[in-house]
Image (tube, rainbow, N blue to C red):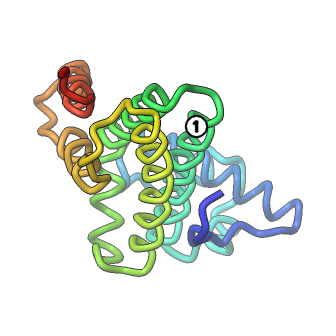
Amino acid sequence: MASTPLPTTRPTRADAARNYDLLVTAARETFAEHGTDTSLEEIARRAGVGIGTLYRRFPNRTALLEAVYVEEIQSVIDRAYDFDRELPPFEALSAWLRSFVGYGLSKKTLAVEMMNALGRDSEFFKTCKTNIQEAGELLLVKAKESGDIRPEIELADVMRLAGGISHLSPAVAPDQAMRMLEIVLCGLRPTAP
């Protein structure tokens, strides 16, 4: 759906693809539970494969983090296209921004670790950002065309607001972050004549 494929090294051979999926799923779950510095041995154990299998597929922690991050970002992108098919324009944009903020609130550590490892200006992050922007732009344009969004609103503004909310201090509860997003969504609407 996105015009620039996200960087991925998912194998095509069935057994290798199965092991890849097991490892990425185990890594995502383990990182969520224990943080990104969890041992690779624990991830291999949880995936039900040997440590050699993990290292053949992911030669280092960064490669595994990258695979998890790509899968997560692809999910955010795919939701935009799903919402576009399933919901009216403003509701599609709103639902996607809620999922985007929810993702950001729950995955801060992973994103920070990836930026530290690869650099904010890396091709990897440029590709991810381009695909997210394309998905968001699709929803924003349709919401503008339907008259549900003020015509002067730009995607960069919306993404900075949503990104700012998703990167709030851990002291801010997720329900407060979502209330803040609802305020932003109200501000996107056209003003009454």
In the figure, is residue 90 to the left or right of 188?
A: right
| Residue that extends furthest to the front in the rendered view of this protein | 193
Question: Is residue 65 or residue 47 the one in the foreground?
Answer: 65
Q: Identify the amino acid type marked 1.
A: Asp
On screen, 192 above or below 168?
above
The part of the image, by quadrant, that contains residue 11 is: bottom right
Instruction: Identify the residue shown where x is 34% and y is 38%.
Output: 106
Instruction: Identify the residue shown where x is 36% and y is 80%.
Output: 122
Q: Position of residue 13 (x, y in %)?
A: 87, 68
On screen, 15 above or below 146?
below
Instruction: Identify the residue shown where x is 42% and y is 40%.
Output: 32
On screen, 32 above or below 19?
above
In the figure, is residue 8 to the left or right of 35?
A: right
Question: Is residue 101 or residue 82 the one in the foreground?
Answer: 82
Q: Position of residue 147 (x, y in %)?
A: 39, 33
**Quadrant the N terminus occupies:** bottom right
In the figure, is residue 179 to the left or right of 104?
A: left
Instruction: Identify the residue shown where x is 50% and y is 62%.
Output: 131
| Residue that extends furthest to the right in the rendered view of this protein | 14
Question: Is residue 125 or residue 41 the one in the foreground?
Answer: 125
| Helix, strand or loop at mark 1 | helix
Question: Is residue 97 or residue 92 the one in the foreground?
Answer: 92
Q: Residue under circle 1?
A: 84
Q: Position of residue 61 (x, y in %)?
A: 46, 68
Mark 1 Cα shell of 10 Å, populated few (<14), some (14-19), many (≥20): many
